[in-house]
Every structure is written in C-alpha cells, then in structure tokens.
Amino acid sequence: MSDSDDDTPRLSAYTLAALQEFFAEQKQHTEPSGDSKYNVGIIEENWQLSQFWYSRETALRLAQEALSAAGASGRIACVSAPSVYQALRELRRDDISVSIFEYDRRFAVYGEEFVFYDYNRPLDLPESITAQSFDIVIADPPYLSEECLGKTSETIKYLTRGKILLCTGAVMEAPAARLLGVRTCAFIPEHTRSLANEFRCYVNYDSGLDRGTEIQTVAAQYRAP
C-alpha cells in the first residue's frame, strides 16, 4: 500500500458540484429558512404520518377564504393543515394572527406560531391557547375515520369562536355534519398527488367556497409592495 495521496480516489469537479447541490437541496427540505420556508410544500410529505399536501392553487384558495372569514385583525388556527398555514404566510398579511397545530415537529421551524398537537389528546394544549380564541379554524384530520374526526372535532370546538372550515373525505360527510354542524361546499380541494379517496370542504357559515370557481386565486393582491 502506498503512503502517497495519489492513490486516494478523488471526485471530479462536476461530481463534487452535483453532490453539493444535492445536499443543499436536502437541507432546504429539512431545514427551510427565510421567506422560502413558507412556500407551499417546502417541507416534504411524510406518508407514515398520513401527510398529503394540497396543490398550491387549493392552498391559496383556502387561505383566501380563511382571510375573508376571519376579518380584519383576525385569528386563524390551522389544525393538521400546514399547506394552508404556509399559503397564509406566503401571502404576507401582517394584520392577522395564524397558528399551526401539528404533530410533525419539523414545523417547529415556524417558531411561536407552531403548536405541537396530537389528535389523540385533543385538549392537551398550551395554557396560552385559550378557549374560543380563533375567528376561524381550518382542520384536515390526518385519518379518514370517525374516531379521528371525533377527537379533532373536540379541538375545533374548543378553539373556534364559531366558524369552521373542514377538509376531509367525502365519506365523512355524515359524521362531519353530526359532530360539527357543517355542510358540503361547491369547491373541491385538490392535492399534489392523486388520492384514492374523494375530498371535500365543509363549512358552518356563509362561505365563498359555496360559489364555485368565481373567486379567483390572485395572491398578488395580498402581497406587500
């Protein structure tokens, strides 16, 4: 064996650059920072946690609906709906308060707006989160089961001052109506991947989502100049 470094395998400049780009990409997905951390889908789905992100268009549409429903200086809770939270923050509305309730601790990158949430413990929330303190709650229970919906409903009813926007499977229409008093909207949410189950949006108030597609997703009108 030679003591010389000449026998040590070396990467070509092209291969080294490709590796650096790969690792930088991986870091961006695991440790997003700056304004880019609010990009819809910047944190990759974890299927083991039953995570399926909305398409950008759907996330923005739901974010716009939440802004309209919450009103000026409103408070919005996103329960297991990180895509909507990201869209709300991407729209850069500083006059609203938004909290993201999530089991996945990767979303702790959002600082004080992140609230660790386990639907199996629906009312195990920080003392700072008081009852009926949000103008609207947007929720997307991670599993299509009445048990999951029932426990998430406890959280929703604790948090909301009245308005509820629920996104879940079409098969959950009856239990959703019974548990939360919500009805199906005309707007149909879409995901970045094709799912086997049909999804629907449900509300308990007069919503723009009931008016089909007449409301355009124009994010620029909310952006800071």
Image (cartoon, grey):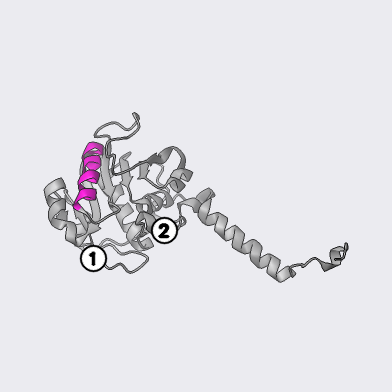
SS of the residue under disc 2: loop
Q: Is residue 185 visible?
A: no
Tell me the quadrant of the picture where the N terminus can be found.
bottom right
Picture residue at 24% right of the left edge, 49% below the top? 148
121 vs 3, left or right, is: left
Tag 2 residue: 45
Q: Residue furthest front?
A: 1
Q: CA distance from mark 1 to mark 2?
A: 19 Å
Q: Where residue 30 sits in the image (x, y, percent)? A: 52, 53
Q: Which residue is mark 1?
A: 198
The amino acid type of the residue labelled 2 equals: Glu
Residue for point 37% across, 51% down = 82
* Residue 80: assigned label: none
Magenta-tinted stretch? 146-160
Taking the spot 28% from the left edge, 62% from the top edge, the residue there is 189
Closer to us: 12 or 96: 12
Q: Dot 1: what SS?
A: loop
Q: Return the disc, 1 or 2, that comes first in the chain's sequence.
A: 2
Q: Position of residue 64 (x, y in %)?
A: 31, 53
* Circles 1 and 2: CB atoms closer than 8 Å: no
The quadrant holding residue 162 is: top left
